[in-house]
Image (cartoon, helix red, strand yellow):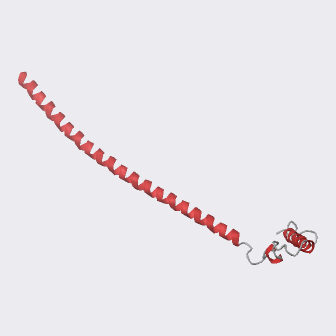
Amino acid sequence: MNHSQDTGPGGMPEDRKLYIVDSINDLNKLNLCPTGSQHLFPLEEKIPDVGTNSGNGSHSLFFMGLIIVLIVSLALVSFVIFLIVQTGNKMDDVSRRLTAEAKDIDDLKKINSLIVKRLNQLDAEQN
């Protein structure tokens, strides 16, 4: 990891330098302003804890993203399962219709063969 981007020429991080300069400015304001100006923040609130909470925000953001991805994945899997069940139901309906139509076609073939036999008998009687 390259630390030369985060630190200045004195070896101190840039954001830390800005907090120090800001704190010095606050001290100068305290010395120049009357004692009634108590709206300035103390020095401890300006300097963040470097070691204690580093990465907690990124961890919580990572877990929130992971939870969102898991919820979306669960919704997609549920939708796919629903589509599979619906497709299975439609296929059952189609197969039932086909078997019913096949029975109807067989009945029509039997009726057709009976009609042809009867017509052949009538034709034989007339000759």
Please state the horizontal and vertical placement of residue 25, each as a whole percent of the image.
90, 70
- Compared with residue 16, is residue 75 higher up or lower down, i.e. above or below? above
Q: How many marks?
A: 0
Q: Is residue 64 left or right of residue 109?
A: right
Please state the horizontal and vertical placement of residue 107, each as a whole percent of the image.
19, 40
> Which quadrant: the C terminus?
top left
Please state the horizontal and vertical placement of residue 124, each as a whole percent of the image.
8, 25
Residue depicted at 40% across the width and 53% down the height: 86
Q: Is residue 42 left or right of residue 101?
A: right
Along the viewing direction, whichever of 61 and 27 lies nearer the viewer? 27
> Which quadrant: the N terminus?
bottom right
Q: State the residue lying farthest toward the left.
A: 125
Q: Is residue 39 left or right of residue 95?
A: right
- Compared with residue 89, is residue 104 higher up or lower down, i.e. above or below? above
Along the viewing direction, whichever of 26 and 21 lies nearer the viewer? 26
Please state the horizontal and vertical placement of residue 49, each as a whole percent of the image.
78, 76
Residue depicted at 74% across the width and 73% down the height: 54
- Compared with residue 66, is residue 27 higher up or lower down, i.e. above or below? below
Residue depicted at 10% across the width and 24% down the height: 123
Along the viewing direction, whichever of 98 and 124 lies nearer the viewer? 98
Residue depicted at 55% across the width and 60% down the height: 72
Query: Which picture quadrant has residue 24?
Result: bottom right
Query: Which picture quadrant has residue 16?
Result: bottom right
